[in-house]
Image (cartoon, rainbow, N blue to C red):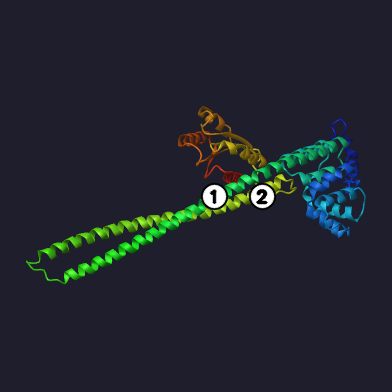
């Protein structure tokens, strides 16, 4: 507890009190309560850490030993001072040196509890857990509180992991659907290119023939008696001009098709990159929800932002909600006026931090109305290419980066 003004010692005795506090030592791993060994081993260390410590200590494990076997072995061994526990102590102190240094300046239990609450809010649990439970000022009530909160977080992480696994088949189905669409588009483009090449070849052959006919007709001397040839020449010349103009128009159309084909190819590459990034983000999100003590930086972290999703398919709303909440955000959905009232659109958008709108599954009028409302409220508006989960993940990644 913090010292009050009434309990402060006389000024001449302060150096002695500080000297006494400086002698207080952090508790070692084997000095902790037995119940705290399990959360420390499971939260502060990875499976690779456990295997490396056991291997360095010369402990022999069965060939088919599971991750749980490694966890149980070290949790049981943590209560006694040994080579294994000394290696664990050294590894934990080195990895979480920054947290230990941060709490070295703490002078009361209330301040220690405040640091723990901030760690829960910032999702910085592993390092702060080790620094708090080994601190000299750790009391029994605070120890009970920390143990209970870490215990419940493990249950929440398992439930989130099950939800993430349930979303994987939906993402795989969406990936297959995109692959099928790309194959169809490629087949259509190849057919258009073949037709274009055939038309160009036919027109060039026709122009060549007309030029040959024109050259042959010019070699014939025109006299008053060959009016028929002169008339034919004029018709051929007129036809040649028409074909020349038609060829120019056709080439312009082919150039436009080529430009469109190039744009579609770029869109295809961009879609593939987005799909690859979405799969990577989903893998990182599943890993994060699976209880990884140190989640990857590529997982979007919304830090409590309010996300409003307008439009899309109603059947996907629960999955979209799980994704947003898994990224530490709150989720509100409105179908854009299909079943929900359009009069509630402005109310839904008001107070939001970011608004997503899939352009492939919302009416034009609703999309414009949401966009105007976001501009009026100075709210970030992000249109999505599709209403799928992967498109939302890309949008969340963009918001997290900003």
Side (left or right) of 6 relative to 385:
right
Residue 365 screen position, x and y as percent: 46, 34
Between the C-alphas of marks 2 and 1, the distance is 19 Å
- What residue sits 53% from the left and 30% below the top? 339
Side (left or right) of 132 relative to 390:
right
Placement of the N terminus among the 4 image quadrants = top right
Q: Quadrant of residue 110?
A: top right
**Is label 2 or label 1 in front?**
1
Residue 317 screen position, x and y as percent: 60, 37
Q: Between residue 249 and residue 41, name the one nearer to us.
A: 249
According to the picture, the residue beneath numbered tag 2 turns out to be 283
- What residue sits 64% from the left and 48% below the top? 282
- What residue sits 63% from the left and 49% below the top? 281
Residue 310 screen position, x and y as percent: 54, 36
Q: Is residue 206 visible?
A: yes
Q: Is residue 353 visible?
A: no
Label 2 residue SS: helix
Q: Between residue 360 and residue 348, name the one nearer to us.
A: 360
Q: Residues within 10 Å of mark 2 (few under 14, many from 20)?
A: some
According to the picture, the residue beneath numbered tag 1 turns out to be 178
Q: Residue furthest left?
A: 224
Q: Is residue 201 above or below residue 121?
A: below
- What residue sits 30% from the left and 65% below the top? 205
Placement of the C terminus among the 4 image quadrants = top right
Label 1 residue SS: helix
Q: Earlier in the sequence, mark 2 or mark 1?
A: 1
Q: Quadrant of residue 257?
A: bottom left
């Amino acid at each position: 507890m913090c010292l009050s003004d009434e309990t402060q010692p006389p000024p001449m005795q302060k150096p002695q009190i500080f000297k006494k506090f400086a002698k207080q030592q952090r508790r070692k791993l084997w000095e902790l309560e037995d119940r705290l060994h399990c959360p420390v081993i499971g939260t502060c260390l990875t499976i690779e850490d456990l295997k490396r410590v056991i291997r360095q200590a010369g402990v022999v494990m069965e060939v088919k030993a599971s991750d749980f076997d490694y966890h149980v072995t070290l949790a049981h061994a943590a209560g006694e001072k040994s080579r294994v526990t000394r290696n664990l102590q050294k590894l934990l102190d080195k990895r979480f040196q920054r947290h230990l240094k941060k709490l070295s300046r703490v002078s009361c239990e209330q301040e220690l509890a405040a640091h723990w609450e901030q760690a829960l809010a910032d999702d910085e649990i592993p390092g702060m857990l080790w620094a708090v439970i080994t601190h000299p000022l750790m009391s029994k009530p605070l120890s009970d509180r920390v143990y209970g909160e870490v215990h419940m977080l493990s249950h929440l992480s398992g439930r989130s992991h099950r939800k993430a696994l349930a979303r994987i088949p939906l993402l795989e189905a969406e990936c297959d659907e995109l692959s099928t669409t790309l194959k169809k588009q490629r087949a259509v483009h190849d057919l258009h290119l073949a037709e274009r090449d055939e038309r160009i070849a036919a027109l060039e052959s026709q122009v060549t023939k007309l030029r040959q006919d024109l050259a042959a007709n010019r070699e014939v001397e025109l006299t008053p008696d060959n009016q028929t040839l002169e008339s034919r020449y004029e018709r051929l010349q007129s036809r040649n001009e028409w074909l020349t103009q038609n060829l120019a128009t056709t080439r312009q159309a082919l150039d436009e098709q080529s430009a469109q084909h190039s744009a579609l190819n770029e869109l295809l590459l961009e879609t593939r990159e987005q799909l690859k990034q979405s799969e990577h983000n989903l893998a990182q999100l599943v890993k994060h929800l699976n209880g990884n003590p140190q989640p990857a930086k590529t997982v979007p972290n919304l830090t409590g932002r309010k996300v409003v999703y307008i439009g899309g398919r109603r059947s996907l709303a629960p999955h979209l909600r799980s994704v947003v909440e898994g990224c530490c955000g709150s989720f509100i959905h409105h179908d854009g006026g299909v079943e929900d009232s359009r009069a509630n659109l402005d109310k839904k958008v008001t107070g939001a931090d970011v608004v997503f709108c899939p352009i492939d599954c919302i009416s034009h009028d609703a999309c414009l109305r949401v966009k105007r409302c976001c501009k009026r409220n100075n709210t970030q508006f992000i249109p999505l290419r599709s209403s799928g989960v992967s498109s939302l993940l890309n949008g969340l990644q963009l918001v997290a980066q900003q």
